[in-house]
Image: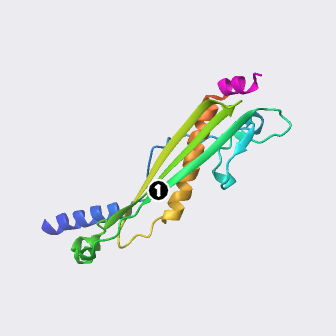
Amino acid sequence: MKRILVLIVAVALGIQGCSSTQVYGASEKAVQPSIQNRLLGRIEYSGNAEYLPRMLATNSDSGSKAVFRYSYTVSYEAPGEHPLTIFNPLLIVGMPKGTDAVVVTGVLEIVKDGTLLKRYEKSVVLKKDKTVFSEGETLTEMRKKGLLLVRDQIDLQLVEDQQILAKQLNTE
């Protein structure tokens, strides 16, 4: 009976140690905006275009006075390991020896004629338990995943507000 109990505990801890990255603050919906329904204006953003919300488009012929200011911040929490951790016998069965976390925040401001029309802000937290058996995602991979999730979440908000924004941006 004791052997079965030890086996069950070992398997449970091993399964927990094999967990993937947990994501907090993002809905499951994914949006692929249509090209003809994008918001047109001047974009102020100096990063990788892959992380820019896809609902935004630059069009110099539109005559739009809209300005889209997009920025993001990324912070990391990867605490060092305590030197005595290596003596913990539960590490052999997959007990986590630490947690890495990445927090990504994206901010989109929509400005027309110097007036802020709307501000969108979205944060996503990604956490991963570290074990002696799992490599898992690196902090760089978690950062990219977070930036894409923030982009998709802001796109989702833009799609929901699309009709209102189109009216505000197209009025002279």
Callout 1 crowding tier (Cα within 10 Å): few <14, some 14–19, many ≥20: few
Q: Residue at x 68, y 25 (%)?
A: 163
Comparing 63 with 13, the one in front is 63
Residue 67 is situated, as x and y percent measured from the top left of the image, at 70, 37
Residue 70 is situated, as x and y percent measured from the top left of the image, at 63, 44
**Quadrant in which residue 115 is drawn:** top right
| In this rendering, position of residue 94 left or right of residue 75 | left
Q: Is residue 125 above or below residue 57?
A: below
Residue 57 is situated, as x and y percent measured from the top left of the image, at 74, 41
Say which residue label 1 marks: 75
Residue 40 is situated, as x and y percent measured from the top left of the image, at 75, 36
Q: Residue at x 62, y 34 (%)?
A: 158
Looking at this rendering, what residue extends furthest in the right direction?
Answer: 61
The rendered magenta stretch, by its main secondary structure, is classed as helix
Q: Residue at x 68, y 32 (%)?
A: 114
**Residue 113 visible, this angle:** yes
Tell me the quarter of the image containing the N terminus: bottom left
**Quadrant in which residue 79 is drawn:** bottom left
**Quadrant in which residue 21 is drawn:** bottom left
Looking at this rendering, what residue extends furthest in the front direction?
Answer: 114
Comparing 17 with 128, the one in front is 128
| In this rendering, position of residue 156 left or right of residue 43 | left
Tell me the amino acid under the disc marked 1: Ser
Tell me the quarter of the image containing the C terminus: top right
Q: Is residue 171 magenta?
A: yes
Segment tinted magenta in the rendering: 163-172
**Residue 28 visible, this angle:** no
| In this rendering, position of residue 73 left or right of residue 10 | right
| In this rendering, position of residue 76 left or right of residue 83 | right
Q: Is residue 149 magenta?
A: no
